[in-house]
């Protein structure tokens, strides 16, 4: 079989009429004829021209799907040199446990996104229904949402470091700024509700209006974060 270097398959990305090659576990496959690899892109997430060994290990399907495409050669063994010992050690761990390459951040980030958005919905519902219990649920959603934000940020930075080599992009840079801003706004909302709002279900109170406004801003921020995260996972431009 023909031997390919990573440079050889890099140009076969399916774009501008090029062939679509992918490498998995040292073997190179031609996926050009697969309907699931139109223009070299699979599920708007995986691009041809790359070694997808780690990706397929964490995919919902197994290696058996490769029997449907053409095996054309093998990938030349190349030793990748990392800038730091920490990165090299981390990569060695991830080779044994590929689950942790992509899944921790998506698994964690949905908690603060859902809880922080829910807090504004519950608070408005509580005011409309004059329900102290619903308002308490809104308050608890805010608290737990804020508590889970740091874990989402840490796993997000880890994913950025591992999968994007800590390289910036407009989407990633904006997402990082919004994440910290949402955390700060969440803390402000918590402080207002805890120390400044006397009656959290009576609209006549000025601080309550400020609190509700802060929650709505927070909901907008987390919605934007979720949208940008979706664009990273399933780019459609």
Image (cartoon, helix red, strand yellow):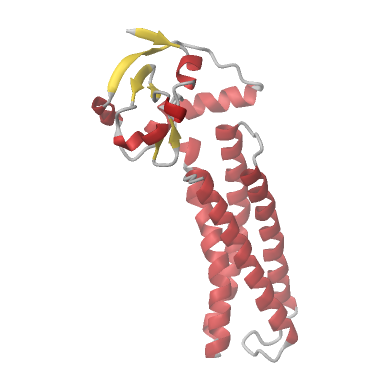
98 is higher (above) or lower (below) than 229: above
Q: Position of residue 183 (x, y in %)?
A: 67, 59
Q: Nearer the viewer, residue 172 or 197?
A: 172
Q: Nearer the viewer, residue 117 or 233?
A: 233
Q: Position of residue 170 (x, y in %)?
A: 65, 44
Name the residue: 59% across, 55% down.
Answer: 225
141 is higher (above) or lower (below) than 1: below
Q: Is residue 34 left or right of residue 223?
A: left
Q: Position of residue 74 (x, y in %)?
A: 37, 12
Does residue 229 show up?
yes
Looking at the rendered image, the quarter that the N terminus falls into is top left
Name the residue: 69% across, 51% down.
Answer: 177
Name the residue: 30% across, 28% down.
Answer: 33
Q: Is residue 44 left or right of residue 73?
A: right
User: Residue 25 lies in what quarter of the image?
Assistant: top left
Q: Nearer the viewer, residue 52 or 12?
A: 12
Q: Position of residue 97 (x, y in %)?
A: 44, 31
User: Residue 36 lies in what quarter of the image?
Assistant: top left
Please tell me how many numbered marks the rendered image carries: 0
154 is higher (above) or lower (below) than 162: below
Does residue 136 show up?
no
Name the residue: 48% across, 46% down.
Answer: 236
């Amino acid at each position: 079989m023909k031997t390919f270097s990573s440079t050889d398959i890099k140009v076969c990305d399916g774009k501008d009429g090029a062939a679509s090659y992918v490498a998995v576990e040292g073997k190179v496959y031609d996926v050009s004829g697969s309907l699931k690899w139109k223009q070299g892109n699979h599920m708007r997430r995986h691009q041809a021209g790359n070694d997808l060994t780690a990706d397929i290990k964490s995919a919902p399907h197994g290696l058996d799907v490769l029997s449907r495409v053409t095996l054309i050669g093998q990938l030349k063994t190349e030793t990748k040199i990392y800038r730091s010992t920490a990165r090299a050690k981390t990569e060695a761990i991830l080779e044994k446990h590929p689950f942790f390459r992509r899944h921790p951040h998506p698994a964690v980030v949905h908690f603060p996104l859902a809880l922080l958005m829910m807090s504004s919905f519950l608070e408005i519902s509580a005011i409309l229904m004059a329900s102290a219990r619903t308002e308490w649920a809104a308050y608890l959603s805010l608290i737990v949402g804020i508590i889970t934000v740091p874990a989402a940020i840490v796993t997000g930075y880890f994913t950025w470091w591992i999968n994007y080599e800590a390289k910036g992009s407009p989407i990633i840079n904006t997402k990082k700024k919004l994440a910290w801003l949402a955390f700060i706004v969440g803390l402000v909302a918590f402080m207002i509700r805890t120390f400044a709002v006397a009656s959290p279900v009576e609209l006549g109170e000025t601080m309550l209006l400020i609190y509700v406004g802060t929650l709505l801003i927070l909901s907008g921020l987390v919605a934007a974060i979720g949208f940008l995260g979706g664009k990273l996972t399933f780019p459609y431009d």
